Image (tube, rainbow, N blue to C red):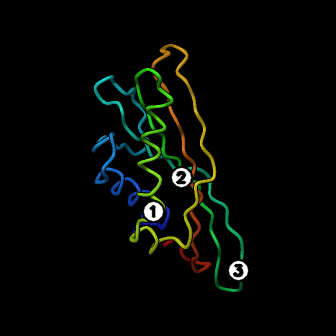
C-alpha cells in the first residue's frame, strides 16, 4: 500500500494531466531531464518537506508541501505562466478525491523564476500545503 504522501502526489499528477489546462497531458512527476521547446507549456509536481505534530496518543497531524511548477516559453513568459497557474488552482483545491486524502489543501506561495539563459522561458512555482491526519503508527 502506498503512503498517504505518495497517494496525494499521484492524485495531483493525475488530476492535472486530466484537467483542462494549456499544459494538456504534459504533467511530470519530479522531472530531472530538460524540458524541450515542444514540451512546454508543462507542469512538474514535486514533493517538499513534511512536518508532523502530535494530536493525541494515537493521532498525528501532517503538513506536506507539494510544489507544482508551471514551465513555459514565450514572451512575456510570466503572463503565460500566470494563465497556466490560474487553471491549476481550482483543479487542485476543489478536487473531491484529493479531499478524501487530505483535510485541507492551501496555496501558500507562488515564486517566479526566469531562465537566465533564455529570456523567453521561465517557471512559476506554486507551493501547496496539504494537511492530513493519520494514526501515529501509520503512514497510509
Say which label, 2 or 3, has the lower sequence index.
3
Compute the Cα span from label 2 to label 1: 9 Å
Say which label, 2 or 1, has the lower sequence index.
1
Q: Are marks 2 and 1 in contact (CB under 8 Å)?
A: yes
Question: Which mark, residue 8?
Answer: 1
Q: Nearer the viewer, residue 64 or 68?
A: 68
Q: Which residue is mark 3?
A: 55
Q: Which residue is mark 2?
A: 66
Mark 1 Cα within 10 Å, few/some/many (few <14, many 20+)? many
Compute the Cα span from label 2 to label 3: 22 Å
Mark 2 Cα within 10 Å, few/some/many (few <14, many 20+)? many
Residue 11 position within the rendered picture, expressed as x and y whole percent measured from the top left: 38, 61
Provide the secondary structure element on which disc 1 rests: helix
Provide the secondary structure element on which disc 2 rests: strand
Quadrant (top left, top right, bottom left, bottom right) of the N terminus: bottom left
Question: Which mark, residue 41?
Answer: none
Q: Is residue 119 left or right of residue 96?
A: right
Amino acid at each position: 500500500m502506498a503512503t498517504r504522501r505518495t497517494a496525494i502526489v499521484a492524485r495531483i499528477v493525475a488530476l492535472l494531466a486530466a484537467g483542462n489546462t494549456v499544459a494538456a497531458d504534459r504533467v511530470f512527476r519530479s522531472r530531472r531531464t530538460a524540458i524541450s521547446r515542444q514540451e512546454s507549456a508543462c507542469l512538474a509536481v514535486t514533493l517538499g518537506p513534511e512536518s508532523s505534530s502530535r494530536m493525541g496518543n494515537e493521532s498525528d497531524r501532517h503538513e506536506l508541501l507539494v510544489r507544482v511548477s508551471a514551465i513555459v516559453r514565450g514572451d512575456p513568459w510570466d503572463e503565460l505562466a500566470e494563465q497556466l497557474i490560474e487553471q491549476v488552482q481550482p483543479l487542485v483545491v476543489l478536487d473531491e478525491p484529493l479531499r478524501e486524502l487530505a483535510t485541507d489543501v492551501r496555496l501558500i506561495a507562488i515564486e517566479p523564476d526566469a531562465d537566465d539563459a533564455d529570456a523567453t522561458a521561465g517557471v512559476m512555482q506554486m507551493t501547496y500545503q496539504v494537511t492530513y491526519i493519520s494514526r501515529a503508527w501509520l503512514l497510509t
